[in-house]
Every structure is written in structure tokens, then in C-alpha cells.
Image (cartoon, coloured by chain):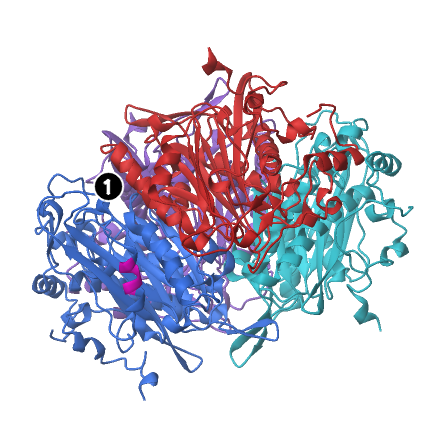
Chain colours: A blue, B cyan, C red, D purple
Amino acid sequence: MSVAVYCFHAAVAVGYVATGATRARDLGIPFDGVPGELNAITDVRRVEVGHTTLIEGEGKLIVGQGPVRTGVTAILPLGKDKSTTPVPAAVFSFNGNGEMTGSEWVEESGFLEGPVLLTNTHSVGVVRDAVIEWGTSKFPSTGDFSLPVVAETWDGGLNDINGFHVKKEDVFRALDDAKSGTVAEGDVGGGTGMRAFGFKAGIGTASRVVEKNGSPFCVGVLVQANMGRRENLVVAGVPVGKEITDLQPVIHHDPEREGSIIVVIATDAPLLPNQLKRMAKRAALGVARTGAVSTNSSGDLFIAFSTAAPVFTDGREHWSTLKNDDLDPFLAAAVEATEEAIINSLVAAKTMRGVNDNTFFALPHDRLRDVLGKYHRLVGKEP
Amino acid sequence: MSVAVYCFHAAVAVGYVATGATRARDLGIPFDGVPGELNAITDVRRVEVGHTTLIEGEGKLIVGQGPVRTGVTAILPLGKDKSTTPVPAAVFSFNGNGEMTGSEWVEESGFLEGPVLLTNTHSVGVVRDAVIEWGTSKFPSTGDFSLPVVAETWDGGLNDINGFHVKKEDVFRALDDAKSGTVAEGDVGGGTGMRAFGFKAGIGTASRVVEKNGSPFCVGVLVQANMGRRENLVVAGVPVGKEITDLQPVIHHDPEREGSIIVVIATDAPLLPNQLKRMAKRAALGVARTGAVSTNSSGDLFIAFSTAAPVFTDGREHWSTLKNDDLDPFLAAAVEATEEAIINSLVAAKTMRGVNDNTFFALPHDRLRDVLGKYHRLVGKEP
Amino acid sequence: MSVAVYCFHAAVAVGYVATGATRARDLGIPFDGVPGELNAITDVRRVEVGHTTLIEGEGKLIVGQGPVRTGVTAILPLGKDKSTTPVPAAVFSFNGNGEMTGSEWVEESGFLEGPVLLTNTHSVGVVRDAVIEWGTSKFPSTGDFSLPVVAETWDGGLNDINGFHVKKEDVFRALDDAKSGTVAEGDVGGGTGMRAFGFKAGIGTASRVVEKNGSPFCVGVLVQANMGRRENLVVAGVPVGKEITDLQPVIHHDPEREGSIIVVIATDAPLLPNQLKRMAKRAALGVARTGAVSTNSSGDLFIAFSTAAPVFTDGREHWSTLKNDDLDPFLAAAVEATEEAIINSLVAAKTMRGVNDNTFFALPHDRLRDVLGKYHRLVGKEP
Amino acid sequence: MSVAVYCFHAAVAVGYVATGATRARDLGIPFDGVPGELNAITDVRRVEVGHTTLIEGEGKLIVGQGPVRTGVTAILPLGKDKSTTPVPAAVFSFNGNGEMTGSEWVEESGFLEGPVLLTNTHSVGVVRDAVIEWGTSKFPSTGDFSLPVVAETWDGGLNDINGFHVKKEDVFRALDDAKSGTVAEGDVGGGTGMRAFGFKAGIGTASRVVEKNGSPFCVGVLVQANMGRRENLVVAGVPVGKEITDLQPVIHHDPEREGSIIVVIATDAPLLPNQLKRMAKRAALGVARTGAVSTNSSGDLFIAFSTAAPVFTDGREHWSTLKNDDLDPFLAAAVEATEEAIINSLVAAKTMRGVNDNTFFALPHDRLRDVLGKYHRLVGKEP
């Protein structure tokens, strides 16, 4: 029976083998905690993820023509069928040099009323209105999509960001194609043109299994990672950024800005909005474990939601929630999965050339292993 | 059977007749909404209130000797017997020129774990530690009183505030004497030396009955009012402060500072902490209806709690809460009861002479009625 | 010389005579404080306002075709020429059932880096991206328009809001047409399809002159008013909503939702971002003076900015700011101008018929005067 | 001339040699960034620190008699002589299971108006009122000490916390004895009875030199560290807590609670309150570098202030501040100095036996070095 396996296997994470993609854990990088089966946000049952990846053109930047290196990622808390069911949620801004539309209403109401979308900085608007259009056409009589949640990071180093290449159809596609199961990482969806610590990065995901009062729960994280300076990069406590100092980005003509990170945390644990806010804050600690210091120009915006929505009967919302005293393993899981998702985004991304032949290099797997080995931090597993 | 009558009678508020005290409503002042039986925070069942009032000495201020015009007010959400049961709660600072200890933990946890105490600005510390001592001696094996909630306003215009006259025994007394039923208003407890709009003020209370989905709920408010300039005073929309311009405070030697207002909102409606925060914010709108503009020196700090604590069984907290869509009458009730509680504090207070013969005059009932009559805002009822 | 007269004449507000429009003050409604020459946000020197008003079609709603009753309003803190100069700013959400993009960065940085735009709920995205396009094309080498501020209220009662009729060209027009001087009120720009207290409403503006330490300063407010229930409407303390109970909206087929209010506060007083946050919060008190209680469905989002940007020389930002102790008249001015701007939006708006012949009626001037007269609250001035 | 050398020498930190105490850096532990001369908060010129340490009795806990293991630490931003000059400041609560009195007014006003005091959880009140008494007696005609800042962590594992052993005279002593220069660490002042990661801990301090636009600035941090689980302890990226699993606390009778951390950040860089808030938030990232995940029961409260107060002339506050774009090295410095201060608190503390012979062991220096050596993370310097 397939429904039972989510967030279940722990010691052996087999799910992502199917993708053929190498992940941080495959390289022998140690992380705290126990991952779910897919080690992905989709280990939280019902969560669906869809990507629209836009890669077109090469060479000189001509605004409006390209090159295009961008996209859209959609996360649906309860899947497409239950898009209109609000889920308990909370947001937190650690450094607000970024945009997350809809955040005021999540903060006020304690609910997320629809999907979370990720894209580039200059396409937040088109994505936002497209979510409304998608919602009102799919669910004309129910739900309320008027204040959608759309977050962004800046991909102008590789992408013709002022060309506004994301169109509403790209948004519909990311939403319609969203599915459970394995999540593509690296240069996909909203993460297509992103980079972190001077390497190519993008989308990353991870999960943790938490046992509480005899029940297993799942915490899943998805990041769009676009932040950090090379010298600060830390992997599993090892100062990788100080050891790998070459393979610096090639940037022509364009001012490089430091970027941002969006963290989306999902859990099936029954938690109140104010408890989810506490989880959302822990994303900052996961970011810290990768060495980033959340610079002035970084938009470090986090959202956490629970798929355990209250049951509405007899005029009341019925909640059966964990106590604050039970939260510690969930807080730890949020920290750990955020850390691993960021490293996954670096491990998955490939070297990319974009506008004006600007180039961001992939973090080389062999050298990463060498550095971790030097610091006695490789686990035995071979990739 | 007496337990059933709380927050029940509406049209005729008979409870306060017993006290012999005149209240705003007795003077024919119109307010929106329907009050509970006592028109007091104690209409919310189980809430208990206790006052320790300290009035000693006259004449010249001698620091440490007096004159003393101060006190302590204690509000126990579930009464003395259930002092160790946390209740859902939230805080809001509209203008933070004041102190409310314990507010960080209420904000973080979503619970109030003990009583709320009100006193003067310079006695917050002794009151805070005394609550811990009271709690650990009364309930040695249960409960957690380490972060008590104590708020303050400034009574240095009438009271020897630097004499630190509140002692821990005064705190114990306010807690031990707390009871349900009628609440004394005006120059009592923490409100003893307070003034508002250039008149003598202090403690005030009021309540509202809210019907929702066929069930009656109660919203009760208690204020310690010490804010506002004469010219701004508005009663039931009428510019009373512009009409009664005499009876200004007599202040010798001492700089007059503008003050603050603490608002405590209680309800038996089952609400989540984030919903209670929304109620706490509405206190600002109630304050606005009295004409105050929340000046720089005003500490306008609000706390709201629900006596409908979740039930803990099977390792979960079980909540049956109202929806956000149901909140509107509760938000309105919080606004209305805050407004009326402030006016009640003015109506109840008597002229007081304190340090250095400084004097704050009572708001004269007959002239208040005259002014409201001039603006066609008196209801038929005679005092 | 005309540049010197802004926020200067006080006793006689002559500016708006030129427009031929009647304003609240012309009807003899009393307000606290002294208005500037135009009694408008543009009394704050350099502030420019532009409206694009979209009114097309009649009768039955056909999504995508109309009828159209919407628009865009642009507020440029330093005018078009200085659109790239950041100004000190702060935001405040009193009830977050609404959208204000860019607010995280204003909160984090303390600056507003471009214009503020107002529109309908479902057009926030197109307006946001259009501001970026406008900025990057007009000021290709300077400024940063990546996180524009766009706020909204809901006009779906009159407008084909799911038809997405606002186009980027409409945004460019509002920005390009922005000017100082008189500001059109009522059914214009973002306010075109809005209503408040069951009457037609929309854009309103007002200002106050503040003297501090011998210098005159100006506080200007512009609102997009779309909130409140009829029974709660209060004008100058008078319960107008309880006196005028007819002229209720005619709504066919469509669920009516309660709405929101956006308040934009401008000042030329030199203030720090944290001081501007204190002003932004006071908008809530101005709203309260009109009787609204900020219901669950209301997006009550406020932004305040100062045109007195710091001077950047020698690697430092040089500020010469007022002290916190000086703030009181500015806080009062923010309250007063917000109140008057809301009433102005009601007085200026005309009866409008929109989708499915839904109709919102204008607040009738003569009856408003009659009610105020009954409560002895009319000043002598004749309209 | 000695006054000029603060925060000046960098490569060789000689100041603490004088104390004879071993610090983290002496053990060869690597940290990012360049420390000031004393590697202490007092590298920020004018900052003074005073400790009152209370250690009395042994053996069985008798409430009110002891054993006593507690104290008070005072940090004076501008020294005793300028105690009445407000300095720009900001607070941040990462996990609010703790108390920091006065925080609402710091948040609202942007200023810290007096010293910062640290003590145990149950003595916050007496310390708070004592600061007011100290201030009003020392500076009767100036300053405003009505809302002092006092923060706490829990020392009930070693100290008779319900015995309320801190007296007002202890507070006066910490304030009167405060001085610049070397700062005692470990089992002193408010840190006397504290522990972290299952080892004895307490007070720790560190500093960083930041060059910006050719000028040197200083960032100093002082922590009262009382948080974290053994298994999470990380030093310089190395999982020390997983390597040293013995030397666990000996706890008799008493429930162990997890604790908290207070971080005080000082800088001489001219920054606005909202910029200081950004620095305060970075303390969370420094905490994260030590492996802590900020558990439910942790009160992680941070305050940052600048000694570069604005100059008040001609009715204005004159500020010459750094730009947001200049902040990055200051943000990094706050992270780095927080991390090092925490490790310093562990390295400085000695094994302590307290109530009921409960015992917390010192982190053994030799074994710490061994573990770091194993992970290739020791720098050459010998202790």
C-alpha cells in the first residue's frame, strides 16, 4: 500500500535513486537527523510540487529577447484537488530584502489559502495575478485566491530579468503539473537562474522524520537558494568556501548583487499558527549552518505550513495539536532539513552560462568530498 | 442558580446597583453593544479581580515617607484555584512607552500562565517577584510562574513613586482577595493614583455580550487609565474636553508627564492565540473613541486572554475554536467595552489630593450630563 | 512665487475651490487641527499624485468584458524627477487582510525606494511588475525598483475584478501624469470602484500643518477607503450611520464582502524610520474616529514616509531629525488627517452603478448636514 | 595614550593575558574575523561592565537559605558618568521564553535609556526596581530610568532561585563597580549559576574590528549563556558534543530545564535603531554556529546598541550614520563575536556544585583541543 510509505523509510533513502541525480547525502556528507523516504518536501503527504523551467537563447543580453534562465515553482500544500482548503501557516522575515506577497494575511489569519509560488524578482506580479486567475477559473464557487503567496530571488546575473519572460501560462503549467513524489532540484523552476556562495544553485529539498508520543511525523523543506559569499560556505561544519577558492563566477558588464533565500517548510504535525511561526524562524538557523550571515541585500523570507488542517463541524474548528513542550524535535528538524536542502541545491545544480556569457560553476562533487575528507567529515557511503 | 447568570441579563444591568457607585451608563451616556450583567470583566465566568489600595499621608513629598497614593490590581483568568492552568492569550503594544513583563513569552507561546497584575511604574519589579513567590509557595509542584505578567502606569503626580511603597505583602493580598462579582472602579488598586484627560481616573471595567452561532459569549475589559489631554476628551462622540476646560489639575513643583493605558481583555469565547491578538489590537480603537491619540509618552499595552483553555488528553491539546469569519462581533465588543471601561474609570474616580498637595479633580457628573445633553447625546435614563 | 505656499495658508483653504468639488469641510463638518493650503497630501512639497480611471460598459457581468470600474493611483514621494531617491519610511498592518507588496523591505531598510501604487485586489501583480518596467526604462542606470510598493482594496462589487482590466500602460499613465497641486477625490484611480459604510467612496485626502520649534511642517494623507458597515459610520462624533439607514447598496447575485482601507501618510518633517512607524500606526486611530472597527475581512495597511531624506556625503547619511518628544503634534495630525481624508472620500464620491447593475449610493450632502445639525455639530460655514 | 588603543590591535590580543584566564582563542580554536584588543565588549570605548557574584553555602537546598550560586551583571553603554544619555538601540526576541524588561520602549523609541542588567529569572524584579532607585538617587534631575532593561536566564539547577538572594545592594554594587578594561568571564555576575550544552557556562565576551570607508569600528558582544543540549554542541564546526559524551551534569531531585541565552551587542559604529535591530537579529546566527536550535524553553533575547548617540543641537538630533549597504561587515561581526563569546563562556567556567550537590562540569580544555585536532580544526597557537 503506497500511501503508508511517505516519511517512513529512514536509514535508506531510496526515492531519489530513480532520478539518477546525485544528492548531498550520496556524496557522504553527514547531516543531523533522519530523513524521510524521498528526503524531500513531498515526504509530507499530499504536498505537490511543480516546476516550469525556462531556458532559451545564449550570448549577449538583449532586454526582452534573452537569454532566458528563469522559471516558476509551485508548492501545493494539499495537492491540486484541495487547493481551496486553507492550511495553518506562518511567515517570518529574517532579512526583508525580498518579496513574499500574501504574507500579511498569513500572519493575520494564521492560514495559507492556496499554493506557494517561487520565481524571479521581476516576475512576482505576473505570477501573483496568474494564481488568482488559475484559482478563480478552477474553483469558481469556492476558495479565496485573492491574496496569493509568491516569493522571489534575483536571477539577473544569468537571466534577462528585465525582459519579463515568465508568462501566466508558465504559472498555470507549474500548478497543473504539480505532483507528489520525487522533486527535481538545482536548475529548475524558480531556481533555474539562481546561485549561492558563488556556485550555481537553485531549488533544493530535504525532509526529516520526527517521532512524538509514538507517532511519526514528517517535516519537509524546499528552498530557492540564491545567497551567500564564497568565503562563508560551510558544509557539515567544514569551511569549504575557504578551501575551494577558484571556480569563481564569470561576470561581464553586470553588477553582481548578493542574493536571497526562500525557505518553505511543510509538516503533517498538527500545529497552531503561532507554533508554525516558531518553526519558520528556525530556517534562519539552518541557513546559518551553511555559513551565510544574511547580508543587507538578502531577502531571507520563510513560510511554514501544516497539512493537518482543523476539521470544521458544528460551527467550530476542531484542532488536536501538539503542545509547545513537544516542539523541540520539530524545531530541530526544521533547522536540519533547511541546511540539507541548501546543500542539495548546490550539489544538484550544473554549471550554467547565461546573459552576456556570465557563468556560474557547479560545486565540484569530487573536490567537495576531498575537502570533507581532509576535515574527517565524510561518512563511509560512496556515491 | 447563580453560575448561569453571568453575561446574561443585558437590557438591565443590575449588578452594580449593589455597590452604590455611579457608572457612565447610569448618567445616560450611550454606548454601542449590549453589556453583561455586571458590565465588568468578571462577567466572563471564573475571572477574579482583587485590589490592594494604598493611601497614606498628606502634604509635602518626602521620598520614602509619602504621601502614598498607589496600589496593586490582580486579574486571575481562571480564579485562584486554577491559577496554574495556562489560558490562550496574546499581547499588543500600540505605543510601547511602558512595561508589561512576561509579554515575550505570551507572544511566543500563545499562553498566559498565571495572573495579570497592574501597579505603578516603579513597583513593577517588586510585584513581579512577589507573584513568583506567591505562585511557588501556593502551587509548589505545578504551574510555572517564572515569567509573570505585570503592567504599569505612572502615578508620580499624586504618589511618592520613588518611595517604593508597594510591598510583596500588598501583592499577596491583591491575589488572595481576588473574587468574582462586582469590581470596584476609580481610585482603587493599581489605579489609585492615576488620572486621564486632566481628570482623576484609575480602574474601569465593562463587558459585552456576543451571540454567535446561537451561543452567548462574553467579552470583558478592565483598564488602568492614565492617559490623554483634556482638549482631546470625547465621550460618546461629544467633545467634552473642549467644553469643560476648567477643573484643571493643580500641580506644584512636579513636572507633569502624560500617561499611559493598560487594557486587559477577557473572553469565554474559544479563540486561538493569533485570534486573541486581533482582539488585543482593537483596544487601540476603543482608546481612540475617547479622543486620545496615543502620545509619545504613553505606554499603551494590551493583553487579551480566553478562559476557554484547550483540553489536554491523549497527548494532544484539543481546541474547538471559532473561525476568523466569526470574529467581527468580538472585535466590535473589544472596541466598545474598552471605550466604556475608560469612561467608567473617569466617572468612578473622586477628586484626589496627593504629593505636594497636587490635585486632580473628578469629572463632574452633572456637567458631563449637561454637555452630552447639549449635543443631543443623552439617553433617557436618569442617574 | 508659488513654491513657497504649500502647507502655508491654514485658516482659509482656498486650493480646492478651483476644482469645483465639494469637500467635507465645505459642508460645515468640524475637524481637529489646521489643514494645509490644499488640504491634500500634495501640501507636502514634492509629493505628486496621478490617477488612471477605468470606467467602461454597463449591465450584466461578463468576466473579461466588464463592466469595468477600477483604476490605478500613483503617489510619488519626491515627484517623477527624483523617483530613484529613497525616502525614510515605515509600514504598519493593523489588520492584514490585504496586500501591500514591498512592505518587507520598507520595514527592514527603513526606506521607500520609489512610488506607492494603489489599485484593485486582483491587479496588484500587473501594477507591481509595471512599476519595475517603468523604473528600469526611465532610470536605467540608477535606482532600484525591484521591490515596488503596491497596495489594494476590493472593488468586485462594482467592477469585473476577475477580468483583469488594468494593463501596464494604465500604470505608466498614472505615474507619468502624476503632479503636485489639487488631488481628485472619490471615484478616481484606485478608488474608482470602492465603497465604504455602504456608501460609494474611493480616494480621499487631507493635510495638517504642524508648528514645531518655530518651523512649520506638513502632514498629508491619502486614503483608498473601502471599509466599514453602515451602522458604524461616525462623522465628527455623530452617529450618521444610525441616522441614515436607507440608501443601502443594491447588490444582485454577488456576495458582498466587507472591505479594507489603505492609508498613505506623507510628511516633510525630518523623521527616522522608527518614528514614521509610530505615525503609520496612528492611521488606525483616524479610522476609528469614523466608527470602523477593522473587521476580519478588512485589509488595513498603512505606510508613512518623509520627504526629508538624509543627505549623503563623506560616506555617511546625515540626518537632522526631530526628537521623540517632539512627535505628539505629528501623531495627532496623522490621526486627524486620516479621519478627514476618509470623510472626504465619501463626500466626493458619486452614486455608481457597476456589474449586474449593482449600485452604491453617494452619501447625500444635505442629509449629512441635517444629521450633524441635529447633533449640534455643524460649523457655521455654508457649502 | 591609552584611550586610543581600544579595538585597535588585532593580530595579537594581549589584553586578557593580564587576567591569567584561558580563553577559547588561547586553546587554538579558530574563529572568523579580527578581534579587538581585549576581545571583549569593552573594546567598544566607554562601555563598562560590572559583576556582583553571590556564592554561599553548600549541600541540601533549603529555600531562602541556599546554597546560593547567582549574581548580577551590569553593562553601561557610556559608562557611569553618562548613564543618563540615551543611546540608539534595538531588541530582538528569537524565542521569547524569557524576560527582558524595558524592551517595549527600546523597540518603540529606538533608544536605550540606561544600563542593561543580567541576573537570574526570579530576581528580575528586584534588579529592575533597584536600577530605578540607583538612577533616581544618582541623577535626580536628569535622565529617565523608569523602564530599565533587565534580562535573565534560569540558574535553578545550581542556585536556590526561589530564595530570592539577589538584593538591591547587589545591584548597586554591580553598577558602581562597572569599569572598562578586561571583563571577567564564566562563573561571575549573572552567569554565576548558568550552564550550556550540559557543561558549566555563564558570562562570555568577544569583539570584532570592522574597517569601513577607511575608519575602524568595533563590535563587542557579551552573553549570558545557559542554553543547548550536549549532543548539539559545535565548536568551530566540529561536533564536540557528539565526541565528549561523558561529564554529564549530576542532577538530584530537581527537574532540569533547558535554558536560554541573552546576547548584548555593542558597537561604536553610528547606526540607526532599525539598523541595530538587524545586528541584534544576527545574534541568532552566532548561536546557531554553536549548534543550538533554540528550543521551546529557551529565552533567546538580544539587544544591540550604538555608543554613537546623535548630537542634539538647534532642536534637532544630528546623526551621521552608515548606509544599509555598509552593514555587511557589522552583521558578520555580530555573528562571529556572538559565537566566540559563547565558546568563551564555556572555556572560562569552572566545575560547580550547587543546590543538592547538583554539579555541572567544566568543558575540559585538553579534550576540547583533542577533538578539534581530530577534525583538523586547531590553529597552531599553544595555550
Q: Position of residue B280 (x, y in %)?
A: 61, 53
Q: Position of residue C377 (x, y in %)?
A: 75, 32
Residue C88 in magenta stretch: no
B14 vs D249, nearest the viewer: B14
Residue C167 vs B134, above or below: the answer is: above
The C terminus of chain C, quarter of image: top right
D329 vs B270, nearest the viewer: B270
Identity of the residue drawn at 75% across and 54% down: B33
Residue A318 vs C133, above or below: the answer is: below
Q: Quadrant of residue D143?
A: top right
Please give left or right for residue A248 compared with residue C226 in the image.
left
Please, which residue is most extreme toward the bottom here?
A: A1
Please give left or right for residue D9 compared with residue D267 in the image.
left
Residue A173 in magenta stretch: yes
Residue with the mark numbered 1: D13
Residue A224 appears in the picture as rendered: yes
Q: Quadrant of residue C127?
A: top left
Q: Which residues are magenta?
A: A169-174
Residue B375 vs B135, above or below: the answer is: above
Residue D77 appears in the picture as rendered: no
Q: Position of residue A320 (x, y in %)?
A: 52, 75
Identity of the residue drawn at 49% across and 26% down: C42
Q: Chain of mark 1?
A: D
Q: Position of residue D246 (x, y in %)?
A: 31, 72
Magenta residues: mostly which secondary structure?
A: helix
Count of numbered circles in the view? 1
Within-10-Å neighbours for mark 1: few <14, some 14–19, many 20+? some
Q: Quadrant of residue A17?
A: bottom left
Secondary structure state at the residue bearing disc 1: loop
Query: Which amino acid is tagged 1?
Result: Ala
